[in-house]
Image: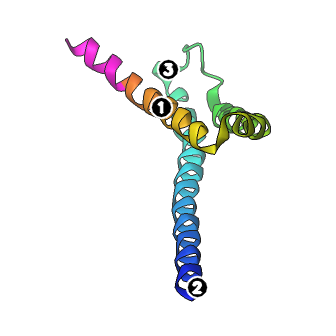
Amino acid sequence: MVADSCIKFYNVILSSVGFLFLFTAFQTSGLLQPTSLSSYFSKDCNASHPLHYADKIGYYNYFIIYGMLAISNWVAAPIVALLTPKWSMVIGAAAYWYAILLPGMSCLSILC
């Protein structure tokens, strides 16, 4: 009984550290995006680019990501209740693999 609770606690700690690293990397890349885009569009050769106002695009990116996260969290609970957790995870994993592999496949088709 004690060993089972220790394993569960270890799993919680491991998941917490994983999410800590994931969101730290996400925040870092999100904070670098406005800086890199504004420096790119501030160069003389790119001043006539249609997106020369992109100094705030990183903030818009955050707005879209967190807005979609909030909406999907509100919608996810009824879907999981309807499909059961097992099938929700299967469908979610399939959609994730599709989203990850699709851009890679399009890059490979360009090379061929």
- The secondary structure that most of the magenta stretch takes on is helix
Residue at 55%, 19% in the rendered image: 47
Mark 1 or 3: in front is 1
Amino acid at circle 3: Asn
Q: Which residue matches tag 3?
A: 46
Crowding near pointer 3: few (<14 within 10 Å), some, many (20+)? Answer: few
- Mark 2 or mark 1, which is nearer the start of the sequence? 2
- Mark 3 or mark 1, which is nearer the start of the sequence? 3
Instruction: Magenta stretch: give its range.
Output: 104-112
Q: Which residue matches tag 1?
A: 94
Tell me the distance, in whole angstroms, between the alpha carbons under discs 2 and 3: 65 Å
Report helix, strand or loop for mark 1. Answer: helix
Residue at 68%, 39% in the rendered image: 62
Dot 1 and dot 3 residues touching (CB under 8 Å): no
Judge by depth and name the residue closer to the eye, 50 or 79.
79
Crowding near pointer 1: few (<14 within 10 Å), some, many (20+)? Answer: few
Amino acid at circle 2: Met
Amino acid at circle 1: Ala
Q: Which residue matches tag 2?
A: 1
Tell me the distance, in whole angstroms, between the alpha carbons under discs 1 and 2: 35 Å
Q: Is residue 34 left or right of residue 93?
A: right
Tell me the distance, in whole angstroms, between the alpha carbons under discs 1 and 3: 40 Å
Judge by depth and name the residue closer to the eye, 88 or 97.
88
